[in-house]
Amino acid sequence: MSTDPKEGIEEAIAPMVFELARLSPLDPCWSCEGHLDPMGELWKTPKVWFYCDSIVAIRVLTASIQDLFLVRKLSAQWQIAAVYTGETGLDPMFSIQPCIQEGDGDTLRRLRKDSALISTHVNDLFRRHAGQFKASLR
């Protein structure tokens, strides 16, 4: 996903981008499927940046991703991080990304598999956690 319409969304991260876009109020704006450097080492991890003006939605998304890690479906822990966009960036922007920063081609394959798994489960988990959060407010 790029600001340049000629670039588009990279294939390995596209499912996560589309699933996050289905979760209101998340609005994906940039993504990367992860890349290796010329030596075959992990250079960039898979991630999706998105706008979100609801801290509750961030909390629910975080709980959803943690569920997958706690039941050992993910190879690495993933996090939701605030993204600094410069002095003029006033809209709340976040990133979903793995906590790992080093590795090789095998690591990247596992992280891409994680992103696909998150894509498969995030919608149902998000709705379940949102319902639990709402019920806890009563």
Image (tube, helix red, strand yellow):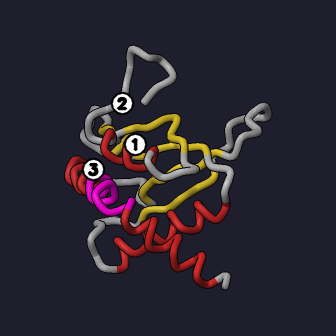
- Which residue range is magenta in the image? 114-123
Identify which amino acid the numbered label 2 is placed on. Answer: Ile
Name the residue rendered at 37%, 42% in the picture. Answer: 18
Q: Looking at the image, do the residues carrying marks 3 and 2 touch, with CB atoms under 8 Å apart?
A: no
Q: Is residue 116 left or right of residue 16?
A: left
Which circle's residue, 1 or 2, is located before the other in the chain? 2
Q: Which residue is mark 2?
A: 9
Q: Residues within 10 Å of mark 1 (few under 14, many from 20)?
A: many
Q: Is residue 1 left or right of residue 131?
A: left
* Front one among 47 and 16: 16
Residue, x 51% and y 22% (percent of image)? 3
Residue found 59% across the figure and 67% down from its top: 59
Q: Can you say whether 83 is above or below 77 in the image? A: above
Quadrant (top left, top right, bottom left, bottom right) of the C terminus: bottom right
Q: Is residue 81 above or below residue 75?
A: above
Q: Which residue is mark 1?
A: 17
